Structures are given as structure tokens and as C-alpha cells.
């Protein structure tokens, strides 16, 4: 994640398909950061139960550092007086819902609490947005119409300009307009051919699928994007024909007739 001329670090997008092992790769990025002296890291995902998976992936790559259970875990550690500066190496695992929630103890948002734990703008650890497509609904022309999650994801990146950002999602960009959250890829803004995201999105949409393919090639060739899938080599399958009895056949015919009637309505 090189530091760009505009003062913030770049990002990488991980778009591997199901089963390839995105979790282990994210854990490996954290392990690399810890080995380089960057002890604190943020990991966001869609559910609190996925923290167990994150811990498993970290242990699998021999990264044995504590994984805090969101801001609640941070609150509990601070109450015990050892969750502050003394906890140098840790991963704070939180959900997107936590990111936009209100704090319960201090007069600051959860987002500000996370930034404070990181140490402010000088923080250079990993910020992982797992299932990053949750932040896709950002309207660059009208931020107030954007979802809270998309605004919070953008705000967190602004508050931690030196962080190593990783966008991880198998469906990160279903449409070009959903890329607004991925500002750290350096596709628009200072030093690029596009002044802002709106200009970038409008230009690519006018040029159709060919432009999108060139965009993917550009990101992959620069090392900013990787998208792989499991091979079908040595996979086997059998074809079974299941005959329907009269009851099942009649039920299917009734359902089909119902849908035909609905379409005519």
C-alpha cells in the first residue's frame, strides 16, 4: 500500500470467490503488519459470530494476538485498566452495525472511539473491510441520501489516511456506481484522470462493458486487485433423475398455473 502524493496510503481489493481462502489471506496481511511493528489492526465484517472465524484464520497463520470483540470488548478492557496503551498488539473485530452505532459511555461516536484506539491519523495498521459491498450505497452527488454504513466507511478512511486498507468481497462491484467506497484504490481524485468519483463513474458507464474489463485489467496489472476462483479439476458429479409421483406432479402443475395467472394479472 504505497503512500500517494495526496497524503494517504493506497489500498488493495481482494475479490476471490467462495472457498479460496480470503480469511487466511487477510490474516496473513495482519501477520505481516505485526512483524513490521504495526501492532493494532481493525477488521470489519457483517456479523459478530464471524469473530471466531477471524481468530481461527489468525491462529492458522501463527498470528497469536488478541482479537477484541468490537467496541464492547474495548470498553471492557478499558474498565479493567489494561486496554489502553499497554495493549500494543491486537485486532479489533467489529461489525458495520457497530461502526455506525452510538457510544454508550463517552460523548463520542463509535467511529471516533475506534480512531482514538488506533492512535489517530498516524495509524498505519491494517483496516480490513470484509464483505465490503455492505458499503456500496454511497451517493457521491448527495451524501445525505447515502446509507450510514457507506458514510462511516468513507469517514473512517479519511480519519486514518495512512492505514493499509483492504476491501474484501467476492461481489464488491456489481455496478460501477457501487465503487464509491473504494476511494483508496486511487482511480479518481488528485493525480488521476478523473477529478471525482462522479466523473469516473459517468465516463466508464458511457463506454460499456469494454471499459469495465479494461478497469479490471488495470487494477490487476498494478497489483491492486486479485480475483480467483476454485478450479473444477478432478471434480466429479453424478446425474440422478427423480420421478415425480402423481401428488408431486399435481402440486407442480397447480403452482405453474398460479404463476401463469399472476403474470396475466
Image (spheres, grey):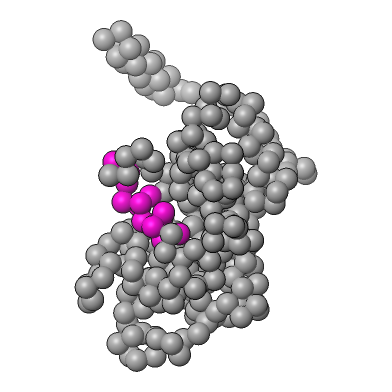
Residue 70 against residue 4 in the figure, above or below: below
Residue 116: image location, x then y, percent: 38, 75
Residue 210 against residue 145 in the figure, above or below: above
Question: Residue sitting at 46 percent across and 44 percent down?
Answer: 180
Q: Quadrant of residue 76?
A: bottom left
Residue 230: in sight, yes or no? no
Q: In the orientation shown, which residue stands out farthest toward the top?
A: 264
* Towards the viewer: 187 or 39: 187
* Towards the viewer: 62 or 203: 203
Question: Residue sitting at 43 percent across and 44 percent down?
Answer: 136
Q: Quadrant of residue 237?
A: top right
| Image quarter in which the C terminus is found | top left
Residue 98: image location, x then y, percent: 33, 63
Question: Residue sitting at 29 percent across and 14 percent down?
Answer: 262
* Number of marks in the rendered image: 0
Helix, strand or loop: magenta stretch: helix
Q: In the orientation shown, which residue stands out farthest toward the right?
A: 234
| Image quarter in which the N terminus is found | bottom right
The part of the chain drawn in magenta is: 145-157
Residue 10: image location, x then y, percent: 59, 57
Residue 105: image location, x then y, percent: 22, 77
* Towards the viewer: 260 or 9: 9
* Towards the viewer: 40 or 97: 40
Residue 114 belongs to magenta span: no
Q: Is residue 76 left or right of residue 213?
A: left
Residue 58: in sight, yes or no? yes
Residue 91 against residue 45 in the figure, above or below: below
Question: Residue sitting at 49 percent across and 57 percent down?
Answer: 129
Amino acid at each position: 500500500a504505497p503512500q500517494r502524493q495526496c497524503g494517504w496510503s493506497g489500498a488493495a481489493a481482494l475479490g476471490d470467490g467462495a472457498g479460496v481462502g480470503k480469511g487466511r489471506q487477510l490474516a496473513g496481511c495482519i501477520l505481516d503488519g505485526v512483524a513490521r511493528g504495526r501492532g493494532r489492526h481493525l477488521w470489519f465484517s457483517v456479523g459478530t459470530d464471524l469473530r471466531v472465524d477471524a481468530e481461527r484464520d489468525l491462529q492458522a497463520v501463527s498470528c497469536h494476538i488478541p482479537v477484541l470483540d468490537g467496541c464492547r470488548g474495548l470498553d471492557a478492557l478499558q474498565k479493567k485498566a489494561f486496554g489502553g496503551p499497554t495493549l500494543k498488539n491486537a485486532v479489533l473485530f467489529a461489525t458495520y452495525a457497530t461502526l455506525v452505532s452510538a457510544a454508550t459511555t463517552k460523548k463520542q461516536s463509535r467511529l471516533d472511539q475506534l480512531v482514538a484506539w488506533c492512535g489517530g491519523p498516524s495509524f498505519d495498521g491494517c483496516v480490513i473491510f470484509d464483505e465490503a459491498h455492505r458499503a456500496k450505497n454511497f451517493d457521491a452527488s448527495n451524501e445525505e441520501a447515502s446509507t450510514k454504513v457507506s458514510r462511516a466507511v468513507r469517514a473512517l478512511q479519511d480519519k486514518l489516511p495512512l492505514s493499509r486498507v483492504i476491501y474484501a468481497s467476492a461481489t464488491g462491484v456489481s455496478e460501477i456506481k457501487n465503487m464509491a467506497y473504494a476511494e483508496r484504490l486511487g482511480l479518481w481524485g488528485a493525480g488521476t484522470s478523473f477529478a471525482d468519483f462522479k466523473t469516473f463513474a459517468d465516463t466508464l458507464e458511457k463506454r460499456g462493458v469494454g471499459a469495465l474489463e479494461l478497469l479490471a485489467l488495470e487494477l490487476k496489472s498494478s497489483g491492486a486487485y486479485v480475483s480467483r476462483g476454485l478450479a473444477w479439476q478432478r471434480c466429479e458429479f453424478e446425474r440422478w433423475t427423480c420421478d415425480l409421483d402423481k401428488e408431486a406432479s399435481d402440486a407442480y402443475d397447480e403452482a405453474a398455473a398460479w404463476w401463469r395467472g399472476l403474470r396475466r394479472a
